[in-house]
Structures are given as C-alpha cells and as structure tokens.
Amino acid sequence: MATLRIGSRGSQLALWQANHVAGLLREQGHAVEIEVIKTTGDKITDVALAKVGTKGMFTKEIEEALAEKRVDLAVHSLKDVPTELAPEFELAAIMKREEPHDAFIAERYGELEGLPRGARVGTSSLRRQCQLKALRRDLEIHPLRGNVDTRLRKLEAGEYAAIILAAAGVHRLGLDKHMRSRISPDVMCPAVGQGALAIETRRDDQRTRNLLAFLDHVETRQAIVCERALLGGLGGGCQVPIGAYAEKRGDGLHLRAMVGRPDGSEILREQAEGDNSEKLGREVAETLLKRGADRILADVYAQEAAVPRQP
C-alpha cells in the first residue's frame, strides 16, 4: 500500500493537527508521512496579519506541494482556508468541530469584564479587536503573532494583561489550565470555520478522497458550508472583521454573524435560521450588506486594515 503524505505547517498546533489525522489514518492500516512546509504566513512574523493582505497566506505553498504531487493531502485549520479554492483542489473531509469559542487567557484576571481600565490585550485578529473595543472602549489592543507557546510567554512576561486565543487550539495542545473563561459567541462571534479541521486534496485524486471519507463529519460540513457562504457573500477573506457561527437547531441551522469596524465604533450583527446551509449563509450576508456591511468593508480595505504597531 502506498504511503500517504500529509502536508502541514510547522507550528506546534499545525503538527498536532497533522499527527492527529495521521494517527487516525494509521488506525485504518495506512502508512503515513508528514512533510513540513513553510508558508508565507509563517515567514512574515513581524507584521500584523491584517496588514499582510495575502490570500491563502497559510495555504498557498502547501497547495503548490499538492499540485506537484509532493504530498497527497493537506491538513488545515479551516479558518485559514480561503473561501474559494482553485478548481484543482477540494475539501475532501471536514472533521468534527471542536468548540468554536474564543478563549480569555490571563494571569491575574478571570474574565474579560474583570480587566482594569486601559489594560493591554493581545490579538492580531481584527474580528476580535473590533468586538473587544465595542465591549470595552478603554482597552488597549496590541498585535500578537507567533505560536501559542510564544504568545503565552509574552503574557507571562507581563507584556499583556490578557490575550485572546481560539479555545480549540488551546485545548488541542493540552493547555487548558491557561484558559480563564470561554467567551460566548453572542459576545464574540467566532471566525468562520473556527474549531474545525479541513483536509484538502487534489480534485482528481479519487483514491485519497475515498480513504478520507470516514473523517468527514456531515453536521460540521453543513455548518461550515453555511459560514463560508456568508463569508463569500460578503466578499471577505480570512483577515477581515467578519465572524460567523452556524450550529444545528432541530432539523435546521442557526447562524450568528457579525461585521464590524476595527475600532469597534460600528458592529452589525444578524441571526437567522434555515434548512439550506448555503442559502442561509447567502441570505444573512445579503441582509448585512443592505444594513451597511458593504460600506464598512470598503472602508476597512481602503485603510488597509490599520492596526497598532507591534510593541
């Protein structure tokens, strides 16, 4: 049996994810190797993500390896995957989602509301920044790049009063002890696809797709299709202040979504339910656009998503 080659970024979290998938494939009797590939997003570490502006900054080089048949599949955090894939690729499996919440991480404070006035909070996400500023205009939001361990070290060194991370990533790395609280999606709407893993393959590779079928989680895929339809309807990418979270309710889906200005001065939120994933996402996107999301996003792009400098 031919060895399956997985392409992955080299961060601690990315390797955990790749090894997790490799382990599940080995349980099925497959031989698996992991090839570490450095992406644009990994190479540019001194600039806030919103300033980089490169589509697929965490996937482009891995897709090149896929196209060249150096790897057979790629494991991604779904929130890093561009809304539109090149026609030669597909998401062969979307795995069961971990918790989608953002996590509040701090040394001295138990929750967001307990931070003192003017506290410095670390995040490089415009989505998190705008929701934080809307909730607490007094907070000082500063960019925070690097892997989870690097971010935690900066927190422990006193550079920040708190940092915000995806709860799923913290949990996967066994670092739950650092998590003080989970932030409700009603307060901080998650990123599209947050908490889910995607496995990308070449569209013409039927064999690999069939081998991965057991990893595809139907309920998670339906939610992700909905969230990505919303993102596509808004014309947004991974690094803009857009949030979406779809979850199963009865026989259908309930979708929360937000679009906001990075400074938190304006946030539009919508909720809706439906039984057609893609249609629901598109309809909520259309509602947000009619309410002014197009104006907000145009301003964000025009300003090149200005964020404070790295301290």
Image (tube, rainbow, N blue to C red):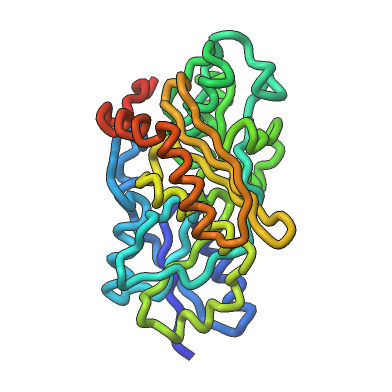
- Single out the residue that lies furthest toward the bottom: 1
Q: Which residue ends up furthest to the right in the rendered image?
A: 250
Quadrant of res 239: top left
Q: Nearer the viewer, residue 156 or 116?
A: 116
Residue drawn at point x = 63 percent, y = 42 percent:
101
State the count of labels.
0
Q: Is residue 21 left or right of residue 73?
A: right
Residue 193 location, x and y as percent? Answer: 52, 52
Q: Quadrant of residue 286?
A: top left
* 46 versus 278 height, above or below: above
**Residue 178 seen anywhere in this rendered image of the structure:** no
Quadrant of the image containing the C terminus: top left
**Image point (37%, 30%), residue name:** 296
| Residue 223 can be seen in this image | yes
Q: Is residue 274 above or below residue 302?
A: below
Pinpoint residue 132: horizontal percent, then vertical percent: 54, 24
Q: Nearer the viewer, residue 250 or 236?
A: 250
Horizontally, residue 48 falls left or right of residue 252, namely left
Is 140 rendered above or below residue 198?
above
Query: With 194 as the anchor, is 235 left or right in this view?
Result: left
- The answer to which image quadrant residue 224 occupies is bottom right
Residue 88 or residue 140, whichever sits in front: 88
Viewer-side residue, 29 vs 279: 279
Picture coordinates of residue 73 (x, y %)? Answer: 43, 71
Q: Write the residue at 40% across / 32% down.
A: 292
Residue visible at 35% across and 46% down in the picture: 235
